[in-house]
Image (tube, rainbow, N blue to C red):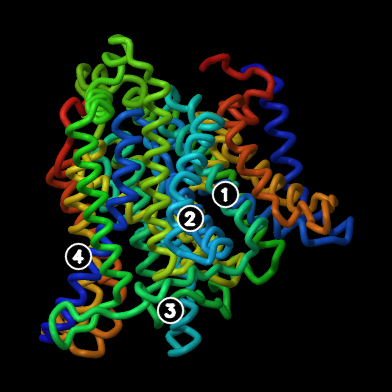
Amino acid sequence: MNWLLLLEQILNGFQLGLLLFLLAAGLTLVFGIMDMVNLAHGSLYMMGAYFCATFTGWTGSFLIGALLTLPAVFLLGVVVEVVALRTLYARDHLDQVMATFGLILFFNEATRLIWGPIGLVIPLPEFLNQTVEIIPGAPYPAFRLAIILVGFLIAGLLYVIVSRTKLGMLIRAGASNRDMIGALGINIRLLFTLVFGLGAALAGRAGLMAGPILSVEIGMGESILILTLVVIVIGGIGSIKGAFIAAILIGLIDTVGRSFLPEILDLVLPSQTAATAAPAISSMMIYLLMALVLAIKPQGLFPPKGVGR
Amino acid sequence: MSISPRLLINSALLIFLAALPFLTDWAGDSFYTGLVARILILAIAALSLNLLIGYGGMVSFGHAAYIGVGAYVVGIGAFHAFEDGIDWMLNGYIQLVIALLGSAFIALIIGAISLRTRGVYFIMITMAFSQMLYFTAVGVETYGADDGLSIYSRSDMLGLIDLNDEKSLYYLIFISLLVVLYLMHRLVGSAFGNVIRGSKSNEARMRAIGFSPYKYRLTAFVIAGAIAGYAGFLMANLNDFVSPDVMHWTRSGDLIIMILLGGMASLFGPLYGALAFLMLEEMLSSIPLTIGGLHVGEYWQLIFGPLLILIVLYARNGVDSFLPGARKNS
């Protein structure tokens, strides 16, 4: 086995996992606090990437573009919440799924109208567009490393916000008993809007970081949305800790699995069969993991307290 | 039994559908026969999903997967008959049995795991399972992967019915729709249907009077899966083509939109919904309006998306609520 390749794939796994975490954190908060299914979360991720591409084009600097993108996506999230989603909290999940499905159609088509059907490219600045030797003889792209660092930083920041600040206290209280904090005189509507905007900004952040390595195109939000749903289902809906652990787990399994499954299958199967089966099986793996987790713990690995209402 | 206005409207629709091939012959434009055939197939699938969503309260977001299983059985059969000369694989009856059993079996496995969960978890796990099948189809190079499979010869029904004749195929689809409508009518009215509906409105009470909903729900899940597999069998024959796209989660979303447009927990709802959905698509995409050099019709989803939100917010029972005799609930 090639140890350097394994190390590289593990880093890639962390990078995918942290991207997933940024998406999952926002989604799981919206689920946990507002009991709201938001399929359009992937669209906010897509908008993050498109905004960043545009702002980078205007200013000529990726960093300034990225900084401008965050408040833009936050505002977009707030607008979407106030205009479309606010009335849906009291509805059942089916209505929420359908209405946010309508939002996806709208965002995809609006993007095609504004930016055209061909994808965009986010140019990276010089210092991120090179490789770093973490250990001698193993060059690794600096930008991917930056994604990992920023991801951990945001995860830490989120942990501090949720567990140490007043806003975090309200979020936690909201997740365990919505009605009670409303009765205690907290402005729930404002809290919901803030949380939704925060979730949107996190999704936008994930989008702008994924933009340069994947590609900025219409529909980019949908494929990653499904992965994000898998993450929050495994982690337990409403749990940020669960989302973090599940995101890293999924990122590692998906990335490392895809590159090493052919070799592993080769040991047990005839090589012809292994070569054809490997791509199909490796894309199924995370779903099998989810099925396994739900078969044992239907509420996910870390169901937040107060679930079961 | 008295004849209600609603029964009259429904019957008029069915008679119109029965006469359609001759009407288009007369008008000299057979395009609409193909379009309506596609609508009817989707209506069959939506009817089966309505058993789960409308009557059972199980929001399955992966129903297109079973259509895909049925369609791929036809596609793979035709592929091997064409490439390797294995003639029995083109036999429509064998294909049909495999399509039904295959989709039922996959629904059994997916249902057995998914039905252990509730609410949002159920929506998402069914969606994830259908994506798993989608990615499996994308990953198998032999059967065309992303590009899909062209079907060079339709299922051979051994002389009983010739699927290559568009009119025969249309009537096979139409009669299948009637059978499924009748089946749903009987199923929903039966003791089994009562347990399914009872578990939706009050599960605790259902348990208290001695029914364990799980088994009944799973049975409904398998029945719905098999009917969707049948719809897939028809669809592959109509399109002469199958690709992973039929299983994509947005296709499952389309089916739910049809149910919502037509009105949930109404027998004919999914049929009206499927008609309304594809008519809207046809109409919106041919809006003859040009603003600043842009054809509005080309961006029809820009209108359809917000329209969908408005329907969800303000017209919960869809077409059904506009028909005479609509229930005044919710």
Chain assignment, label 1: A
Chain assignment, label 3: B
- SS for tag 1? helix
Q: In the rendered view, does A290 fall on the left or right side of A87?
A: left
* Same chain letter for marks 3 and 4: no
Chain assignment, label 4: A
Q: Nearer the viewer, mark 3 or mark 4?
A: 4
Give the amino acid at mark 2.
Met
Residue B93 point in image, percent of width and height = 46, 67
Q: Tell me the CA gap for discs 2 and 4.
A: 23 Å
- Residue at which label 3 appears: B143
Q: Tell me the CA gap for discs 1 and 2.
A: 9 Å
Chain assignment, label 2: A
Tell me the number on the disc at residue B85. none
- Contact check, label 3 and label 4, Cβ < 8 Å: no
Tell me the number on the disc at residue A252. 4
Q: Nearer the viewer, mark 2 or mark 4?
A: 2
Tell me the number on the disc at residue A107. 1
Q: Quadrant of residue B3?
A: top right
Q: Callout 4: 10 Å neighbours few (<14), some, many (20+)? A: many
Residue at the spot x=25%, y=39% of the render? A237
* Same chain letter for marks 3 and 2: no
- SS for tag 2? helix
Q: Tell me the CA gap for discs 3 and 2.
A: 31 Å
Q: Earlier in the sequence, mark 2 or mark 4?
A: 2
- Residue at which label 2 appears: A46
